[in-house]
Amino acid sequence: MMRCRLAIVAMLLLALPAQAQDALITYKSLSPEVALELARATLAACRERGYQVAVAVVDRFGVTQVVLRDRFAGAHTVQTATGKAWTAVSFRTSTSEIAAISQPGMMQFGLRALPGVVAIGGGLTVEAGGSLVGGVGVSGAPGGDADEACAKTGIEAVRDKLEF
């Protein structure tokens, strides 16, 4: 009987550290330096194509880390780029995908009415080691596909710093 009680107590004590570990989550996030480098590389990619844009980089939770706006980019581009980055992270997919699945008459059309959602191409998730670490949004190029092309180039420019 005493052995049984000791065994039960031992099992309970061994289970406590596992429960404590389950209560905490470890995650990777973009450093401010890499977020800034990503924004700069994205802005440079758009400049090379002749576009004046704003670029926003958000962390894995959608909180803004960096915003860069080129001199002649429209006033609306900062908010739009930030919204695209937030939308990509929030839905864990590109904003061009959100735009495609939420066209008028489609079942997901209501996504466009959610607060903060920007369903226009130009927002991408940033992943490293299979984990979401942030998002990048671009606004100001002539179309969401051009915004997205700049964002892809920016992500590729920092890819070696993202792998772990």
Image (cartoon, rainbow, N blue to C red):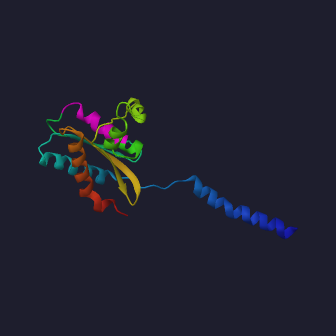
The magenta stretch spans which residues? Answer: 74-87
Residue nearest the observer in this picture, 136 or 23: 136
Residue 65 image position (x, y, % from top left): 33, 44
Q: Which image quadrant: the N terminus?
A: bottom right
Residue nearest the observer in this picture, 76 or 144: 144
Residue 121 image position (x, y, % from top left): 28, 41
Residue sticking out furthest to the bottom: 3
Q: Residue at x 17, y 49 (%)?
A: 45
Q: Residue at x 31, y 38 (%)?
A: 82
Residue 3 image position (x, y, % from top left): 83, 70
Image quadrant where residue 87 sits: top left
* In the image, residue 9 above or below residue 102: below
* In the image, residue 143 above or below residue 19: above
Within the magenta stretch, is there residue 75?
yes
Q: Which image quadrant: the C terminus?
A: bottom left
On the rendered structure, is 60 left or right of 9?
left
Dominant SS of magenta comes to helix
Judge whether residue 141 can be spotted in this image: yes
Q: How many marks?
A: 0
* In the image, residue 77 above or below residue 17: above
Judge whether residue 64 can be spotted in this image: no
Residue nearest the observer in this picture, 127 or 145: 145
On the rendered structure, is 23 left or right of 137?
right
Q: Residue at x 15, y 39 (%)?
A: 52
Residue 27 image position (x, y, % from top left): 45, 55
Image quadrant where residue 76 sits: top left
Residue sticking out furthest to the right: 1
Within the magenta stretch, is there residue 79?
yes
Q: Residue at x 39, y 29 (%)?
A: 113
On the rendered structure, is 108 left or right of 75?
right
